[in-house]
Amino acid sequence: MFANPDRPAHPDHPFRPPATLVPPGTVAPPATVVPPATVVIVGAGPRATGLIERIAANAPELYGDGAPFELHLVDPHPPGGGRIWRPDQSPLLWMNSMAEDVTMFTDESVEREGPIRPGPSLAEWARGVRAAREARGAELPPELAAEAAALTGRSFATRRLQSAYLRWVYERSVAELPPGTTVHEHRDRAVRVTGPRDGRQQVWLEGRTAPLTADAVVLALGHLDAEPDAEQRALTAFAAEHQLVHLPPEFTADSDVGALRAGEPVIVRGLGLAFVDLMVLLTEGRGGRYERGADGELVYRPSGREPVLYAGSRRGVPYHAKIGYSLAGERPPVPRFFGPAEVDALLSRPGRPDFRRDVWPLIAKELGFAHYHRLFTAHPERVAGEWSAFEEKYAACPPGSPDLDVLVAAAVPDPADRLDLDALDRPLAGLRFDDHDALRQALRGHIEADLARRHDPAHSPDLAVFLALLSVYGQLIRLGDIGGWWHGFFSFLASGPPGPRLEQLLALSRAGVVRFLGAEMTVTTDPVRGVFRASSASVPGAAVEARALVEARLPEPTVDRSRDTLLRSLHRDGAAATPAGLLAVSPADGRVLDRAGGPHPRRFALGPHTEARASGAFARPGTNAPAFRQNDATARALLLCVRELSCRATLTA
């Protein structure tokens, strides 16, 4: 059963068998002569939840049933969703993955040493809620219960429903911890970790005089706020001097969008997912609504409370819509040209691989292989020759070589069927428009074409490339923090908004609420007029002025600029950072590395602030998700660590 009547829906109803959950603020029982093994996890969002699930799965083998074990979770936000997926968000905010593509559980595709513990995807969980009205899922708030009842595998759930799913996964995972486990939830903020390499660790909590003492500590901090860089500081200072509004890079749900006034122009830098959230909060969130016209076209009816958004970015176009169909037939057999053997070869070279020189050509060949495999096998009328002959020649061509281009040109007659990664990455490169009206028409055509293509199985090579992108992401984890450009490219192609959001964007453009600025956008300040000014390479000589500027993107997760006190103090105390500023960790098990490259025996870290950052804490089923592999490896290393320490304590007691 996906909904268990023995586990209530909310933390107000504590559950205890087989593990014991100690509610926040409860004083732990007195320590025994030999204290139980103790682990502190800083962060209680989906990454911590996934780690707990793996601890529960691996503990019977590596730690033993019934052995005393204490687990402390430290997070000011509720466990399960944490800060980013907290339940108190606007019901207008959606996920950008379909419900059937969201799971927190391992399956046969995941390369791991621990056992598989199957569990429901978000869509399956919602079906379980519907099928068991008397169970805990029926205790969801009415609006979420109604959403779960209407959810299909192809739906884009609200973030609030995802929060409920994550809470359910958390409670199930805690309930599956072995007997003898006690879980403590601390709604606090951790500010520092101290302790010798060969001794117990102290985790200091904000406002507390006594630390939590642990045998091992895991940082699962999730997305963090950051101090502004020099450009952002200058923009903030200019805004303060001229009584303007400047919203720096941050999680959109936390932004002070109330400062953006109705009817006034707002310059928005960024057209990714943060922009989509901003667009929603400033339109539907202010009382606007959408209707279908007689011709089926979506029409936006303004409330009159919306600002006018002038939006641009480096690419000048929104992220590609999520693909709206499933892959029928054979999946691309990846990895083929960028797999474990190629990564081994890169790691065996002296020095750090250069992404553009050493890695990108292999990735490009892998993506091309997936694209042409699908084109030949699913759309043979659009190619010349047989797949087997093409594959043999393709494999023999060096990555990025002229020979490869000649081979593809001969085998794929229509240039529209060829994979052009440069054109995909920069669709407006080299294009110039006479004015913003001409740009607007071109951008609408681009978005309309993207929506049509992403929902048409005739373009199924796009979905094959998407699956290859997931495979590549999984391989890159072993190389550490390499190729910052890659993360943006991946998100642009593979992690865009739901199709309906782009349809809404078109309606907002037609209503004049959103206006496009173009590619290679720049923002300057005009101290004489006291305004921000934005321009782009797409419309030379044209500029837009505004008294408000929004940076629609998340801050970079660097250690030195993080606002997280614990992360900064860890770095000051000797933890290493990568050249791009991420926390250096062992790719094998997530142990924090010191500046000499040595792994800390008792400190681990997972998530976007580390060089082993994966594509997300949850994943599409059947894709060998990197986060699940990392969680399993870290859970096993953690259990072996505390088992050894527990054995030592027993022998010396």
Image: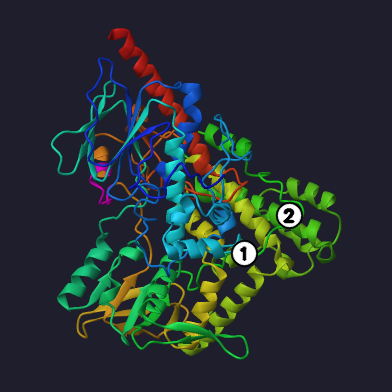
Cα distance, mark 1 to mark 2? 31 Å
**SS under mark 2:** helix
Q: Main secondary structure of the magenta part?
A: loop
* Residue 188 appears in view: yes
Residue 548 or 164: which is nearer the viewer? 164
**SS under mark 1:** loop
Query: What is the image's colouring?
Result: rainbow
Work out whether 207 lies above or below 493. Answer: above
Work out whether 244 lies above or below 2. Answer: below
Look at mark 2 in the image and give the residue it sits on: 403
Look at mark 1 in the image and give the residue it sits on: 323
Residue 561 magenta: yes
Measured as percent of width and height from the top left, residue 71 is found at 34, 32
- In the image: residue 475, left or right of residue 586: right
Sequence order check, earlier mark of 1 and 2 = 1
- In the image: residue 525, left or right of residue 482: left
Image quadrant holding the C terminus, namely top left
Work out whether 409 lies above or below 510. Answer: above
- The residues colored magenta run 560-567
Measured as percent of width and height from the top left, residue 361 is found at 60, 50
**Residue 641 falls in image quadrant:** top left
Residue 542 magenta: no
Residue 5 or 163: which is nearer the viewer? 5
